[in-house]
Amino acid sequence: MLQVLLAVGMGALALLLFVVWRVRTDGAWALWWHDNYLERLRDFTSGQSRPMRILQFVQSAAAPGDANSAICAVDSYCANVEWAMNVGDKKGQILDAVVLAVRPRWVLELGTYCGYSTMRIARLLPPGARLVTLEMNQHYAQVAKQILGHAGLDTQLSPSPAPHTQGEEPVGGATQSPQGRWRLQEALIYTTLHCLQLPLQLFSRPPQNPLSPFCPKATEETAERQPAKRSSACKVDLLVGASSALIPQLKKKFEMETFDLIFIDHWKASYLPDARLLEECGLLAPGTVLLADNVTCPGAPDYLQYVRNSPRYRSEYFPCQLEYLQVEDGMEKSVFLG
Ligand SMILES: C[S@@+](CC[C@H](N)C(=O)[O-])C[C@H]1O[C@@H](n2cnc3c(N)ncnc32)[C@H](O)[C@@H]1O
């Protein structure tokens, strides 16, 4: 009997070690673990969505009106407390470099999520520049608006939320967001699994202070007495809806011609159809730069195949790591040639 128990215990331990090893080395496993299992578990235990938890951390940790502080707070939270699908600090530096090199007047972002990359881009834009960001998830868009507001960015959300969704608290705790519809038995299974793997965390790196020393923390003074200062003179337009529906409306809505920079960071299957749609709608001019995130993990092979082989683009790959993890990823910068 003891031998059977020992064998079962060793088997379970070996399985857990295998899972942990895969999660740390394989992009698909890492995304499933962080973006599915752990997120659902925390949604269930906290009764809130992950974007809401990020918002609350930003509000408590970042100096109001300071985009750099808000960026730093999001990075600190996501590196040390819970992973989230922001472009992150390392790939964020590639994004920063491209924004600074292009010096765009019109920027389009596909996929806002909590507004992390929106803040990174907006803080580097010259006065008078416009940043249009598209997000199909209403709850994420409302959280992003609040984070951008805390960072001091002038953000117009459209369409505006319905009256019953307005106010300090954005719609959707865990129970209302699409990820948050939970069944109790599912939660119990996740919780049991999570408890089983807790001993393994003894072997992982020690927990760090969520706030890095470089992140100016909001003191009572900054939070209460300091008036919010504007981070950037650039205006952010946050449109709620699917990119395929919104892209054809952009020219008319903003009375503009073409974008100078497009940051592509929504669902990967939409990269290629949306790039083609941008071409069809005449939103690209010779010199327009497309910067696509996550082209290696989770990957957008059809998009890469297209921009690397089309005579209409000059394309360059930037190897890097998936946000907040040691998993291989990459960004593709493609200049539209006409
Ligand atoms: C990877 S996250 C964006 C992260 C963000 N760019 C950042 O770095 O902080 C992808 C987001 O795109 C949104 N999304 C996915 N497909 C979309 C589509 N077709 N149109 C608009 N938004 C979309 C998702 O809801 C999600 O919030």
Image (cartoon, rainbow, N blue to C red):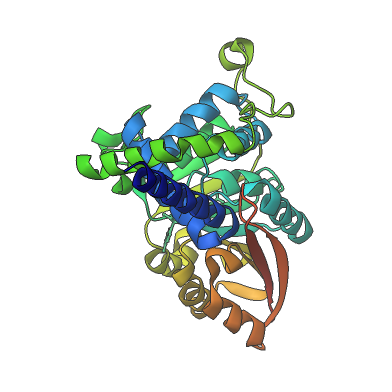
Q: Quadrant location of residue 74?
A: top right
Q: Where is residue 94 in the image (x, y as percent from the top left)?
A: 72, 56
The answer to whether residue 205 is above or below residue 327 is: above
Q: Position of residue 305 (x, y in %)?
A: 59, 83
Give the answer, above or below, for where 330 lies relative to 137.
below
Q: In the figure, is residue 102 to the left or right of 248? A: right
Relative depth, front residue between 212 and 283: 212
Q: Position of residue 66 (x, y in %)?
A: 65, 30
| Above or below for 1 versus 19 | above
- Residue at horizontal 33 percent and vertical 39 percent from the top: 192
Q: Which residue is drawn at 58% across and 83% down?
A: 306
241 left or right, relative to 189: right
Residue 307 vertical placement versus 208 (above, below)? below
In this view of the protein, can residue 49 be seen by the observer?
no
The answer to whether residue 138 is visible is: yes
The residue located at (45%, 70%) in the rendering is 270
Quadrant where the N terminus is found in the figure: top left
